[in-house]
Image (spheres, grey):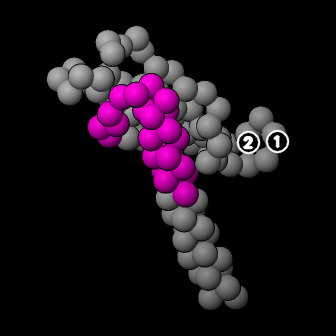
Amino acid sequence: MASLWTFILIGSVIYLFWLNRKVAEAANVHAKRQCEQLNVQLMSVACTKRRFGFLKSGKPGIKSEFSFEFSSDGENAYQGMLIMENEFLKSVVVPPHKI
């Protein structure tokens, strides 16, 4: 019986790691797409907040906030924010920047 709980625990940890990687990769894709639309250069993407909970759909999942840095002229850096539920983009916050 103890070995069954061990397998369940190990399986859960592997699944959560896989789900976190999937969300991070989706955030990177969304940040790249946003920078292409703004015609700026993407510099970095980082997770600033992540929590497990129930999504607006009522299903359990991961709510995340990712910050991404971009540059419009190669000298100044600006920071935007991606708000996601699982791998789906909910909103984007981009500060005013020089083009």
Q: Quadrant of residue 16?
A: bottom right
What is the three-letter code of the residue carrying label 2? Phe
Total numbered badges shown on the rendered structure: 2
Instruction: Estimate the x, y position of residue 92 in percent, counting from the top left.
Output: 55, 26
Instruction: Estimate the x, y position of residue 30 in percent, counting from the top left.
Output: 52, 41
Q: Which residue is mark 1?
A: 58
Q: Main secondary structure of the magenta part?
A: helix
The foreground one among 49 and 40 is 40
Q: Residues within 10 Å of mark 1 (few under 14, many from 20)?
A: few
Q: Which mark is residue 77?
A: none
Q: In this orientation, does residue 49 appear?
A: no
Instruction: Estimate the x, y position of residue 63 in percent, counting from the top left.
Output: 61, 40
Q: Secondary structure at mark 2?
A: strand
The foreground one among 47 and 25 is 25
Q: Residue at x 79, y 47 (%)?
A: 59
Q: Residue furthest right?
A: 58
- Left or right of 59, for residue 96: left
Determine whether 21 is above or below 99 in the image: below
Distance from Cα at disc 1 to Cα at disc 2: 6 Å
Magenta segment boundaries in residue numbering: 22-44
Q: Residue at x 81, y 40 (%)?
A: 57
Q: Secondary structure at mark 1?
A: loop
Q: Quadrant of residue 41?
A: top left
Instruction: Estimate the x, y position of residue 77 in percent, counting from the top left.
Output: 26, 24
Q: In this orientation, does residue 55 appear?
A: yes
Q: Which mark is residue 54?
A: 2
Q: For the N terminus, which image quadrant?
A: bottom right
- Left or right of 2, for residue 55: right
Q: Are marks 1 and 2 in contact (CB under 8 Å)?
A: yes
